[in-house]
Image (cartoon, rainbow, N blue to C red):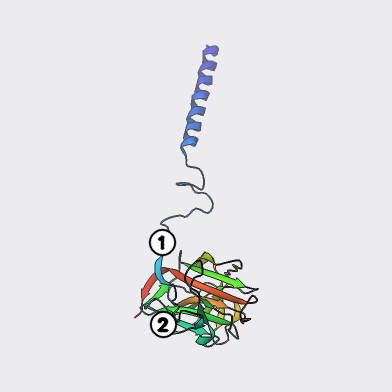
Amino acid sequence: MRKYSLRFLAVLVVVTSAAVFSSLAQEPAPGRGGGKGKGEFKGKGAARPVLVFKEEWKNSAGKEHPYAPEDVSNSDLEMKVYGVKPTDVLVTGSGRDGDPIHLWTGLTPAPCAVTLKDKNSYVDLTGLARIRWVSKVSGFHEVRPVIKLADGTMLVGDHTDEARADYRVSEFNISETRWIRLDPEKVQTKGDFVANPDLSKVDEVGFADLTAGSGHGPGGWIDVGEIEVYGKAVPRT
């Protein structure tokens, strides 16, 4: 009798173990669909951003020349320049053979910022909002994002692009950018990083060159071509 009891117990252990391993094999791996791994999004995901506006620039004179309002190709946009005169920023590029039409800061006598304002809408840059642009730099210059909030506060971000060899397309998320206040007259940073700025209603979006230009030839300047801003349009009231 004891012999049969031991056999029954052994069979029971084998059957139970098989059931446990089968159950574990059917559970989703941590961090994948259905699991609860580290870094997994919980609940409904953030809404995908859409293209709010795009600017490709026009070379209205057909050659290098000081910026003019007709160089903005998108009629819904208005370009603003801070820190220097608008005509200190030049428009150049052929738009052919890898030479995009772009803004150039080589003759700017001081730090400057260039922004675009949608005449019909603010831009909500929360969530998964992002900026995409084409740029190239010379020397130790850097292209940085700049935004102006609805209340007039200007901020410059810590994201930088430093493509020196040739033009490069760069795309970055706003949520991964830290911001410092920017003096719009001098285009100089002020204070420490701003904690949790309200980006739900942004008035202007653009870029900054925090160093004066060095003139033609290698040395120090930035080129910025096509700009795309992804987020959510908020009607102006």
Give the secondary structure at mark 2: helix
Q: Position of residue 146 (x, y in %)?
A: 52, 76
Amino acid type indicated by mark 1: Arg
Residue 70, numbered label = 2
| Circle 2 residues within 10 Å: few <14, some 14–19, many ≥20 | few
Amino acid type indicated by mark 2: Glu
Image quarter in which the C terminus is found: bottom left
Q: Disc 1 designates what residue?
A: 48
In this rendering, the count of numbered labels is 2
Q: Residue drawn 50% across and 53% down?
A: 40
Q: Residue drawn 62% across and 73% down?
A: 138
Q: Is residue 181 visible to the viewer in this orientation of the structure?
A: yes
Q: Is residue 17 above or below residue 92?
A: above
Q: Position of residue 92 (x, y in %)?
A: 51, 77
Between disc 1 and disc 2, whose residue precedes? 1
Nearer the observer, 58 or 130:
58
| Circle 1 residues within 10 Å: few <14, some 14–19, many ≥20 | few
Spatial distance from mark 1 to mark 2, Cα to Cα? 32 Å
Residue 134, numbered label = none
**Mark 1 or mark 2, which is nearer to you?**
2
Q: Position of residue 185 (x, y in %)?
A: 55, 87
